[in-house]
Image: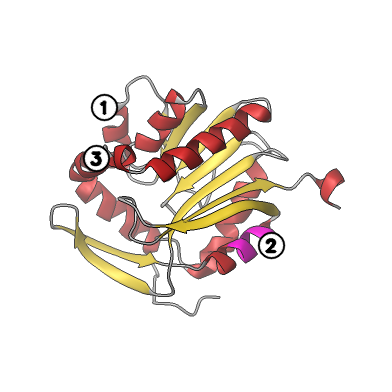
Amino acid sequence: MGTGPNTAGWLEDTRTSYDTVAAIYADLTRHLLDETPDERAVLALFADRVRAEGGGPVADVGCGAGRITAHLSRLGVDAFGIDLSPRMIEVARRDHPGLRFDLGSMTDLAFGDASMAGLVAWYSLIHVPDDEISSVFAHFQRVVRPGGPLLLGFHVGDESQLKTQGYGGHQMNIYVHRRQHGQMIAWLNDAGFVVETHRTLTSAESTLGGIILARRQVDDLEE
């Protein structure tokens, strides 16, 4: 697509912005799941899907300070986190010392083909420009094993806004992209995922949040 705002340098802007706010971000978001029963329910459903497919490693991509990784671990999932921000990874390791957190980018996942039992991107696609989404989903499709679940959280809407400060008033320089379910589902279908369920809700996570649970196609069954 590529018709949105000029987001050149978005990876570096995202890294720098979240390095700046990492500590306060962790403090402000660590208890959000306590206030979001619908999100807890869909995370539990995702965990059930992983177990039903035989278990295995699950990547929380764009994990931030690690709260979703930790929640999945408490649900019995072999979850680990990956994030672009070195400072976020430091905070995640500090707050959740028994879990694995790696520095990395969803634009170039350093995992083997079909090596993940599942993957979560919980409000971590919101800074990815439209013209990069298909590439990111292609990486997701490559690393998730056939039949494995993919869980997405995102902001629903039609506009992109430049965020210049946040999380305690600290300086940031990132675009927040809002998308409709139809566009997200089309991108997922093109990448080789089948959407099982999706919904929009309002909660402490997002005033208008989208949830999509999909699975990687199994070629011999889907053709």
Q: How many marks?
A: 3
Q: Quadrant of the N terminus?
A: bottom right
- Disc 1 from disc 2: Cα separation: 38 Å
Q: Describe the element under mark 2 as helix, strand or loop.
A: helix
Q: Give the range drawn in magenta.
A: 185-189
Q: Where is residue 163 in the image (x, y as percent from the top left)?
A: 26, 66
Direction top: furthest residue: 98
Picture quadrant where residue 58 is located: top right
Compare residues 74 and 64 and report the one nearer the observer.
74
Give x and y (percent) for residue 153: 46, 52
* Residue 24 placement (x, y as % from top left): 18, 44
Looking at the rendered structure, which numbered label has been put on residue 94?
1
Left or right of 151 in this view: 138: right
At x 49% / y 80%, what residue is drawn?
3
Q: What residue type is labelled 3?
A: Ala
Residue under label 3: 26
In the rendered structure, which amino acid carries the disc numbered 2? Asp
Say if 16 sits above or below 50 in the image: below
For mark 3, give the secondary structure.
Answer: helix
Residue 155: which quarter of the image?
bottom left
Packing grade of label 2 (10 A; few <14, some 14-19, many >=20) is few
Residue 22 seen by the camera: yes
- In three-dimensional space, the C-alpha distance between marks 1 and 3, rounded to whole angstroms, equals 11 Å
**112 lies left or right of 90:** right
Quadrant of residue 30 in the image? Answer: top left
In percent of the image, x 62 and y 25: which residue is there? 55
Instruction: Specify few, some or many for label 1: CA neighbours under 10 Å numbering under 14, 14-19, or 20 or more.
Output: few
Q: Mark 2 points at which residue?
A: 190
The reply, left or right, for residue 153 in relation to residue 109 is left
Percent from the top left, x then y, of residue 68? 40, 37
